[in-house]
Amino acid sequence: MFHLKNNCITEGGCHVLAAALNSNPSNLTELDLSENKLGNPGMKIILTLFENVQCRLEKLNLKNNCITEGGCHVLAAALNSNPSNLTELDLSENKLGNPGMKIILTLFENVQCRLEKLKLNCISITDEGCAALASAFNSNLRELDLSRNQIGDSGVTEISSLLRNSQTLQMLSLKNNCITEGGCHVLAAALNSNPSNLTELDLSENKLGNPGMKIILTLFENVQCRLEKLNLKNNCITEGGCHVLAAALNSNPSNLTELDLSENKLGNPGMKIILTLFENVQCRLEKLKLNCISITDEGCAALASVFNSNLRELDLSRNQIGDSGVTQISSLLRNSQTLQMLSLYVCDITDVSSLTQSLTNTKALQFLKELDLRGNEIGDSKQKLIDVLRDSNCKLSYDFDKCNREVRLSTVDSNERVTYDTAEDPDLFFTYNPPPPPHVGPSGTANSENVSDTVDGCIGVIGHKIIKAVVAIILEHLVDKQLKKDCYGCQGVVDGVLCDLRDEMYIVEGLAELRTKLVDETCEQAIYDAVDSWKKSTPSDSD
């Protein structure tokens, strides 16, 4: 196993790396070079490893490496020269397009191909690419990720023929692909014709609506359905669709262990309907995500009254549950002997005394591993909770200050330096000595030069160049709108970029226009395009 993810490696470093790998190839089974800058020339050099008959590489990650259609012939030739060991390939976030994808798919024509996991997330393909994939589909493939492409309903039609014929596919992700009700009929028919293998289906961030969801859920009426993980996040589902959803899940509840309904406007009434699933003795749900579904303390009370003993992870983030809702959740926590992760991120919480009480002298603390309270302006009661959790195995995440939304406090050393890691990537961490607040003039406006220094300092510490692509916009608004924010607010926004641009932009006032641009259906591709453009205009790595 060799991980060199996100290390600013370019073509220049590939010769030495390839020579080193080729000197002893028989032990290396996993190589992660994702999020570097290899480009087509660098990739070509690395792939000489496959020419070595002793190569035993099983997993190769080249995600986000500036690889284009022009490099696909070299990639396909290399992989075809030694295909019998490779089982996992990630080419996500490279602009391969339909032509590039067709070239890569020649690998499937090789009878020695053993590829089981293929990730083609955000590679700019359409229904044309899906047609090529369906025609060349490999019988060994177990996981297929086509997220964040523009396949649409017509692409789903092409994928459906693949689903009907596969006897091995277990995980399918079609996240963020502009799929509507129109594509649901053919998808549901394909899934129902061959339901016994698929265990994970991700249809998040599409436009199914209640009618489309109803069609997809006919899969649960099939007694052969083995679906364990279902993601319907952000699909325009409302309270009106909850009866259908609950009925479908209750008809075949014994396999489903993970359900994500986040970012749908279910409200308290819709949540109560969904919770009838917990009344079913066959319910095996372990992970439930209800992030941003417009519930209040009323929904929390309903949840506490029907709490399922199997639940291990519960996400209620970005709801308006307030302190009274936390009290309801605390009663749930007090009686739980399975809950390991509880997320109450941005829930209008100011008092966590009830949580502290529920974790004191109860068995709940033996099981709880993670408690997320970031994004809440919690008062003095926070310290008692910290004290209770100090010697436990539970990781508490909370705001270092009220403006810092996406950085969680990990440790504080003897020199009072604070170590953070990011919510989405725990492996990414940095140590930061917070500077004094910038000079504030008589009008209460932060001095722009000091704010700029603070942002530049954050960039240097975090070391993620993607931040630079948006810092100019952030700084412009901070100064132009004369925001009365200190330097921590500035860092909070910058750190938010690392984790989730769309969720975090609201922290700073005056960014409404930018946020609107970020939340539309093309936002992620637009961000990648902006970053690519910025990279091309950057003269050197030191800039």
Image: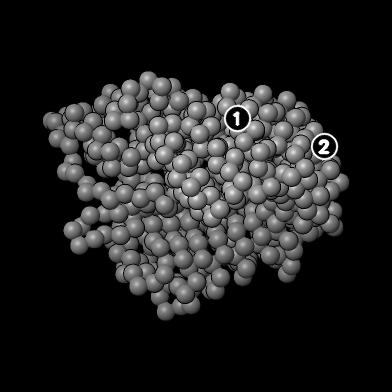
Q: Say whether residue 85 is left or right of residue 522.
A: right
The foreground one among 426 and 85 is: 85
Compared to 145, does 290 lie above or below?
Answer: below
Q: How is the image coloured?
A: one colour
* Amino acid type for the residue under numbered disc 1: Val
- Return the residue found at the far top: 537
2 or 1: tag closer to the N-terminus:
1
Check disc 2: other Cα within 10 Å, few if <14, some if 14-19, many if 20+.
Answer: some
* Amino acid type for the residue under numbered disc 2: Ser
- Return the residue found at the far bottom: 361
Give the image location of residue 442, x and y in percent: 13, 30
Which mark, residue 74?
Answer: 1
Question: Taking the image as drawn, is residue 69 in sight?
Answer: yes
Residue at 37% across, 20% down: 537
The foreground one among 205 and 445 is: 205
The foreground one among 212 and 162 is: 162
Q: Secondary structure at mark 2?
A: helix
To which residue does mark 2 refer? 161
The foreground one among 463 and 82 is: 82
Check disc 1: other Cα within 10 Å, few if <14, some if 14-19, many if 20+.
Answer: some
Q: Say whether residue 267 is left or right of residue 399.
A: right
**Viewport quadrant of the C terminus:** top left
Give the image location of residue 197, x and y in percent: 78, 53
